[in-house]
Amino acid sequence: METLADLFAFPPINRLHHDRTHRIHTVIRPRTQRSQSDIGPAADYCLAHHSLEGAEAAARADDTATFDWYITHPDMSAVPNSTPTSVGPRVVVAPELTELPRSAISETPYYVLGPGTDFAPPHLGDLAADAYGTAVEAGFGELLAAHAVVLCLLRSKRLGDTLDSWTISRLPGTVFMDHVGDPVVLARDLIHEGGHNWLNDALTATGCKVDDNARFHSPWKQTMRPAFGFLHACWAFPLTMLFTARALEDTTGDLHRFLTAYLDQQRSLLAGTSADHARALELISDDGLRVRLAAAYEQALAL
């Protein structure tokens, strides 16, 4: 892979986005001819999953009004309220963590866009736009354009605090994360979670079934993990390392020291995974996907 754009450009994912979106819209609005929206196939794909989850929850609750809203708003009415960024319009929300539901669809809290969605205040929208721009400058625009469409900003913390972030497979293209009010740190975490969404889509698109009977030691979790989780870590953390190495060139002061310490820590953690990573890659049956996972890992290992 000569560039990061080459790394993230993966035709099977494009086909998955198109086909899955079409199927969801067919289920939700079976008698409506759906045309391509103005927000692009990746955003359509992300918002279609929100629409499907919201409609299903409304149906189970016998909430006809909300169900009808989802049926008539497959794009979630998100476009007029979106935040302009260098990768296209993004949906930025800032729900209270304590108000996020938990259910059978996810072990972690999550948020589904709907008729009552409150969009993030302007200062958080500006923070998000700056973070996307920072990621684009470092070469990660293709990743975030397709895999970080909805951004749920959670708790505001201080630089150096533990930041929690996550994705859930039922809402691809959506990322949940704490933040410290700095676009560089937010860009790093967007890349990490966008990377998880990319790999989930890539595995689905290629039909790769990772044998989770194989276990590997994860230095990030300090435990033995199934191959799926281990490969995710050995993809997402190297991406943040590649970004951090580029970001260090333009930072100073406390932020520079914070990022330097982060990169040093990740170098140390990644160094001990070489043998296991080589074995784990053998479980990936698709050549194109395997090459991409190996390329990001090797580039990070060389930092």
Image (tube, rainbow, N blue to C red):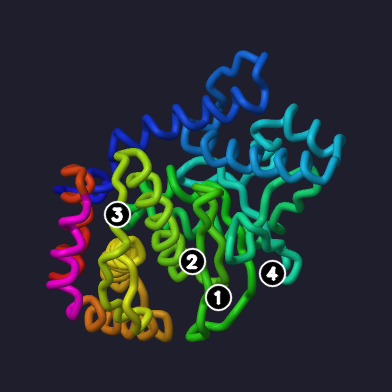
Q: Gap between marks 3 and 4, in whole Å?
A: 32 Å
Q: Residue flagged by tag 4: what amino acid is it?
A: Leu
The reply to whether dot 1 and dot 4 touch (C-beta < 8 Å) is no
Front of the two marks 1 and 4: 4
For the point 26% across and 83% down, which residue is it? Answer: 264
The residue singled out by tag 1 in the image is 180
Q: Which residue is mark 3?
A: 210
Say which amino acid is labelled 3.
Val
Q: Along the line of sight, which residue is nearer the eye, 66 or 182?
A: 66
Is residue 243 visible in this depiction of the protein?
no
Res 186 label: 2
Between the C-alphas of marks 3 and 2, the distance is 30 Å
Question: Residue at position x 54%, y 34% from top?
Answer: 44
Using the image as rendered, state which of residue 92 and residue 181 is in the foreground.
92
Q: Secondary structure at mark 4?
A: helix
- Mark number for residue 279? none
What is the distance, in whole Å, between disc 1 and disc 4 at their CAs?
16 Å
Q: Is residue 218 above or below residue 281?
A: below
Is residue 141 part of the magenta span, yes or no? no
Q: Position of residue 151 (x, y in %)?
A: 57, 55
